[in-house]
Image (cartoon, helix red, strand yellow):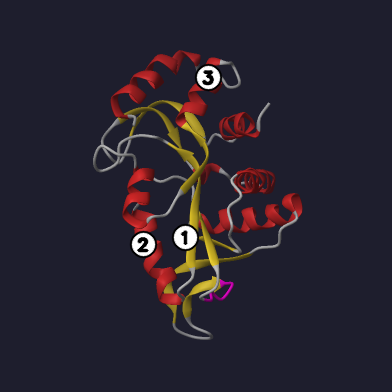
Amino acid sequence: MSYKKEFVKFMCDSDVLTFGEFTLKSGRKAPYFINTGNYKTGEQIGKLGEFYAKCIAENNIDANVFFGPAYKGIPLCVAAASAMFSKEGKNVSYCFNRKEAKDHGEGGVIVGHKLSDNDKILIIEDVITAGTAIRETLPILKSASNASVAGVIISVDRMEKGKGEKSAVSEVYDEFGIKVYPIVTIEDIIECIKDGTIDGREYLDKMIAYREAYGV
């Protein structure tokens, strides 16, 4: 089983990927939902970091710092950095932001690695729905240094229309010139239903119909 199929099964086993009828922020009625807030054990976060590390290594992303946007990105960047060292033999730095600047001690909004102009940053996210987190993150990074952003890695690319006719992932690239690397896409999830890697065949028709209606 490929690591992509393993990851889809892992999300289902962790109750992160579920099927049913869900109303999204966009108002769309989706037959599936991804809630990375349901990862809650040491075993889960350890495995999750390994999947991120595999995707990073597979895509040969040249980055020496992982950044996790508060709040969901914080455990993700730590887990990914740990797995990169233990599984891929690459020691990278990590940092994340506070929601509010600290007004005592060293101050500032970034915790962990102190960014420099020569750094290459990989932003570690869960999903991109409208690119809001990226638009909030870039000014934070820019205020700290002139480091370059090597890309963004996410768990799942929903491959559906964002604000316009393009996907949110494509909009991020068009607006900022930053490439987004997903561990899996909705197409991978549909394929896993078809081949029996995960349960949910009763939702297959709805998944395909939703993809046809909103997909890009």
State if disc 3 and disc 1 touch (CB < 8 Å): no
* Residue 9: % across, % down: 60, 29
Q: Residue at x 61, y 64 (%)?
A: 64
**Amino acid type of the residue tagged 3 in the rendering:** Ile
Q: Which residue is mark 3?
A: 193
Element under disc 3: helix
**Amino acid type of the residue tagged 2 in the rendering:** Glu
**Taking 160 as reference, is 142 above or below it?**
below
Of mark 1 and mark 2, the one earlier in the sequence is 1
Residue 76 colored in magenta in the image: no
Of mark 1 and mark 3, the one earlier in the sequence is 1
Location of the C terminus by quadrant is top left
Q: Which residue is mark 1?
A: 69
Q: Residues within 10 Å of mark 2 (few under 14, many from 20)?
A: few
Given residues 46 and 182, the one toward you in this image is 182
Residue sitting farthest toward the bottom: 105
**Taking 143 as reference, is 15 above or below it?**
above
* Residue 51: % across, % down: 63, 43
The reply to whether residue 170 is visible in this rendering is yes
Type of secondary structure dominating the magenta stretch? loop
State if disc 2 and disc 1 touch (CB < 8 Å): yes
**Taking 142 as reference, is 200 above or below it?**
above
Q: Which residue is mark 2?
A: 136
Q: CA distance from mark 3 to mark 2?
A: 35 Å
* Residue 215: % across, % down: 34, 29
Of mark 3 and mark 2, the one earlier in the sequence is 2
| Image: magenta residue range | 112-116
* Residue 101: % across, % down: 42, 76
**Amino acid type of the residue tagged 1 in the rendering:** Pro
Residue 115 colored in magenta in the image: yes
Given residues 214 and 75, the one toward you in this image is 214
Q: Residue at x 36, y 57 (%)?
A: 176
